[in-house]
Image (spheres, helix red, strand yellow):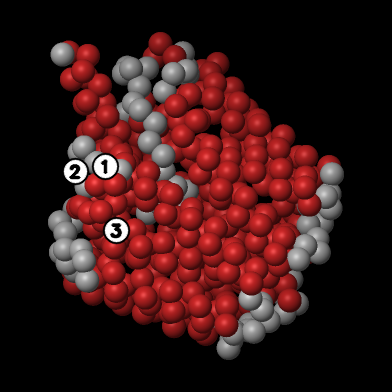
Amino acid sequence: MLQVMSGSWALYLGMFMLMIGNGLQGTLLGLRGDLEGFSTFALSIIMSAYFVGFLFSSRMTPQMIRRVGHVRVFAALGSTISAVLILYPVLVEPWAWALGRVIIGFCFCGVYVTAESWLNDASTNATRGKALSIYLMVQMAGIVAAQYIVSQGDISGYALFIIPSVLVSMAFAPILLSVRPTPQFAQTKPMTIRRLIEASPLGCVGMFLLGGVFSAQFGMSAVYGSQIGLTVGQISLFVSVIYIAALVAQYPIGWISDHIDRRILILLVGFVGGFGALVAYFIPGNFGVILFSAAILGGTSNPLYALLIAYTNDYLEREDMAAASGGLLFINGIGAIAGPLIVGWMMETLGANGFWMFSSILMFLVGFYALYRMTRRSRSDLDTDGVSYVAVSSSASPVLVEVAQEAYVDAEIEEESQANA
């Protein structure tokens, strides 16, 4: 672990600052938008816009990198992020913020693709799994640190918009001064959606539903907290608990998934997440209950993302695993775009607690669909012994998911070699 960190510390430091910047702007816009009197529906459009940009960037950034190189793409997108962050408090209009979120989503995805390709280039077969684990911890730490910064600032002023802009700009220095400027980049041609659905209907449906859950957590949690009258400090703690629980639960759930039928675990995790969200819906206004539900929802939905990728890989040939990553992310991205729009409508219809009802419904649907698939496909239909679980963040770019897929393959090869030894 220390060897991996010492070799890529600058990349991890830069990504930590980038995640603080992204975590700040997500929470801050929800709080400031509510303060400015934006409607819930307007805020849902603003939050959904981020995922529109992210989805387009996941397809376009690889082409940009091949055309002009990593360094130019990284610098151009990072500079654009800094500019947009500063413009938010100047152009306080829903349409301007929505446009800014499209641009921010596009640029952050592009920055992730570039930085994560450097991470992949710096990793070997022996260190790839550890590098992914550290990267996941850095991402979560950055988002949690962002919530603390929000709680210490004035959301009605300019400072909280300037801080993420500065952090994003500063993040370039350690990365660009320490990594190789031109790592090899060859994104795998994605598998068709139809073929992916045929291979794993549960993986595809689950990824679509989780896209809605993640976008609600990332975009609308601050709006929910503001609407029910939580203080800025309480909202920051509420959002932090989601991500802390996600990090803590990743590895126990991953270990369990390698020892039982993953569909049973998907069913159980989906139901636990759904019931956890219902607790806050039926006991509204109690901050302790809100934190409990946040921990349950975050601790189930985020590991479920990696669990669904592992389950899908169980039904793919080794050479198809990397190709499947693009399709899975596209399906998840479509759900993420729709998520804030639907949860915004539910919050206007049912009140702020529609946030919990929306998350609960989607988690239950994941569980019920897993149950249905157990009646349609026997575990004996599995052509392989299954692949090992690898922790993956829900904010991963196509490059990082491909890195995770490579880690699956590495683990499978190692298990085969040990079995034959």
Image-quadrant location for residue 255: top left
Q: Position of residue 111 (x, y in %)?
A: 34, 65
Q: Is residue 95 left or right of residue 408?
A: right
Q: Mark 2 — residue?
A: 124
Q: Is residue 7 left or right of residue 54?
A: left
Residue depicted at 67% across the width and 47% down the height: 294
Q: Residues within 10 Å of mark 3 (few under 14, many from 20)?
A: some
Which of labels 1 and 3 is toward the front? 3
Q: Position of residue 238 (x, y in %)?
A: 67, 55
Q: Position of residue 139 (x, y in %)?
A: 44, 55
Q: Give the number of the disc on residue 128.
A: 1
Residue 361 visible in rendering: no
Residue depicted at 65% across the width and 61% down the height: 236
SS state under label 2: loop
- Is 264 in front, or is 297? 297
Residue depicted at 35% across the width and 22% down the height: 386
- Is 187 in front, or is 305? 305
- Is 358 in front, or is 166? 166
Q: Amino acid at mark 3?
A: Trp
Count numbered badges in the picture. 3
Q: Earlier in the sequence, mark 2 or mark 3?
A: 3
Q: Are marks 1 and 2 in contact (CB under 8 Å)?
A: yes
Q: Give the number of the disc on residue 9.
A: 3
